[in-house]
Every structure is written in structure tokens, then in C-alpha cells.
Image (cartoon, rainbow, N blue to C red):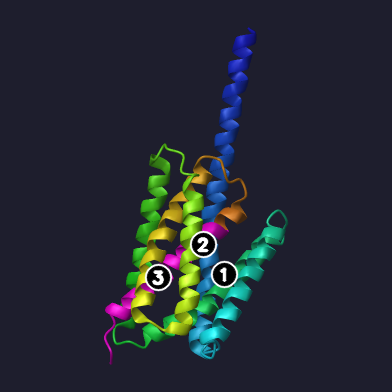
């Protein structure tokens, strides 16, 4: 009798855990989809007004890094409160604004619109593949985290140096590495949610959003460099 009660309790715990994981995953996907709205709005405003056109070189770097890290700190502080979602959406609007300089440059090419759509399609394909892999792979991928963090740090340092060097080859190398690292970050973060390692959907959304943003930006930069038709 005691054994039966124990088994019933164990099954109940597993069911509850599965429900929580599914809820976090579902809320993350909804918030991730919603976060694209202010991103697109911010990018559109930036392209139309040229408000970020002057943010070149060191000034652009300071504004981007200061704004991004400031918002991420605020998201971490508010992730368990009602303010968490609005702060995250404000961050995605800011990221859209920061993306507008690259978008404007690519849209100025003869085939700019098709390059943007190709980058969007490529990013969506990467996310689809990683989302499916996260449900198929049974192995624990948590150990990847520290290596991916080192990779992301190397990309950031390389990008900062290249702002002042202005090397096209350097930009291409950084963008290629970023696509690989942040695609794997998507897999790592999705697997954490699937395995129950991440229970806060705002934190989960932030991680996935940053990976998607970096993959899209890097794809767009590469397409602009090597696939752009000068008018």
C-alpha cells in the first residue's frame, strides 16, 4: 500500500513538473513572438527618421552597450514582477532602433529588400531546427553554456576592436562565428526549458531573443557584404 502511494505521488510530481515545463515553454514562445512587434517598430522608426545614423564608431558602441546592459540589468531585477514584460518589450524596441543603421545600409542596396527577407527566413529556419533538436536530443547540454559564453565574449571583444579597425574580413569572420555560437545558444536555452532547468519565462525569452537578434544581424551583415547589388 505504501509503495503504491509512493508511486502515485512520484507520478503526480512528474506530471506537475511536465505541466510547469510546458507552461514556461508556451509563455516563452508567446512573449518571444510579442517581442518582435516593438523590435520591428523600433527598426522602422530608426530607418524612417535616421535617428541612429549619427551613432557611429565609439559613440555607437557606448550607446549600444550601455543601453543593452542597462536594460538587461533592469529585466533581471523585474523578472518576477508585473514590470518584467514591459521592461523586456522596451528593451526589444531599443534593439530594433540599434538594428536600424544596418537595415538602412542594406535597404540602400539594389536588392536590399530581398536580402532582409533572406536573413529573416534564414533566422526562422535556424530557430525551427534548434527548437526541434531541443525536443529530440536526450543528452544534457548544460555543459555547453560555459563554452558558448566564452565564444560570445570573444565575439564581443572582436566586434569592439573591429569598430576601430574597420576590417571587412574581420566583420565577416565575427558575423560567421556569431551565427554558429548564437545558433547553439538557442539550442542550449531551449533544451534548458525542455529539461525544466529554466522556470522563468521572461529570462528564457531574453536569452532566446538575444540569440535570434544576433543570428539575424549577422546573417544580414554577411548578405550585405557578399550578396549586395550596388546601385
Are the two marked residues, 3 and 2, in contact with CB atoms closer than 8 angstroms? no
For this view, does 157 lie left or right of residue 78?
left
Which residue position holds label 1?
Answer: 92
Which residue position holds label 3?
Answer: 174
For this view, does 102 lie left or right of residue 75?
left
Q: Nearer the viewer, residue 92 or 65?
A: 65
SS at circle 2:
helix
Q: Does the magenta portion include 187? A: no
Nearer to us: label 3 or label 1: 3
Measuring from the top left, give residue 95's x and y in whole percent.
54, 73
Residue at (47, 65) in percent of width and height: 154
Are the two marked residues, 2 and 1, in contact with CB atoms closer than 8 angstroms? yes
Density class for disc 2 (Cα within 10 Å; few <14, some 14-19, many ≥20) is: many
Density class for disc 3 (Cα within 10 Å; few <14, some 14-19, many ≥20) is: many
For this view, does 157 lie left or right of residue 223?
right
Q: Quadrant of the C terminus?
A: bottom left
Q: Earlier in the sequence, mark 3 or mark 1?
A: 1
Which residue position holds label 2?
Answer: 209
Q: Which residues are magenta?
A: 206-231
Q: Quadrant of the N terminus?
A: top right
Q: Quadrant of residue 74?
A: bottom right
For this view, does 200 lie left or right of residue 41?
right
Q: Is residue 221 visible?
A: no
Residue at (44, 60) in percent of width and height: 182
Amino acid at each position: 500500500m505504501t509503495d503504491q502511494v509512493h508511486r502515485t505521488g512520484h507520478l503526480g510530481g512528474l506530471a506537475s513538473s511536465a505541466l510547469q515545463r510546458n507552461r514556461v515553454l508556451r509563455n516563452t514562445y508567446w512573449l518571444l513572438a510579442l517581442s518582435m512587434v516593438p523590435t520591428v517598430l523600433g527598426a522602422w522608426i530608426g530607418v524612417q527618421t535616421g535617428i541612429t545614423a549619427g551613432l557611429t564608431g565609439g559613440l555607437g558602441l557606448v550607446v549600444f552597450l550601455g543601453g543593452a546592459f542597462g536594460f538587461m540589468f533592469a529585466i533581471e531585477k523585474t523578472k518576477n514582477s508585473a514590470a518584467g514584460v514591459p521592461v523586456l518589450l522596451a528593451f526589444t524596441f531599443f534593439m530594433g532602433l540599434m538594428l536600424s543603421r544596418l537595415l538602412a545600409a542594406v535597404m540602400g542596396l539594389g536588392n536590399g529588400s530581398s536580402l532582409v527577407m533572406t536573413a529573416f527566413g534564414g533566422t526562422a529556419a535556424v530557430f525551427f531546427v534548434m527548437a526541434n533538436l531541443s525536443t529530440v536530443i536526450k543528452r544534457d547540454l548544460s555543459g555547453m553554456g560555459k563554452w558558448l559564453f566564452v565564444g560570445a565574449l570573444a565575439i564581443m571583444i572582436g566586434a569592439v576592436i573591429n569598430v576601430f579597425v574597420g576590417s571587412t574580413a574581420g566583420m565577416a569572420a565575427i558575423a560567421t562565428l556569431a551565427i554558429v555560437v548564437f545558433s547553439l545558444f538557442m539550442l542550449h536555452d531551449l533544451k534548458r526549458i525542455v529539461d525544466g532547468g529554466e522556470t522563468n519565462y521572461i529570462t528564457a525569452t531574453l536569452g532566446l531573443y538575444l540569440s535570434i537578434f544576433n543570428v539575424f544581424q549577422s546573417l544580414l551583415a554577411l548578405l550585405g557584404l557578399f550578396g549586395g547589388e550596388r546601385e
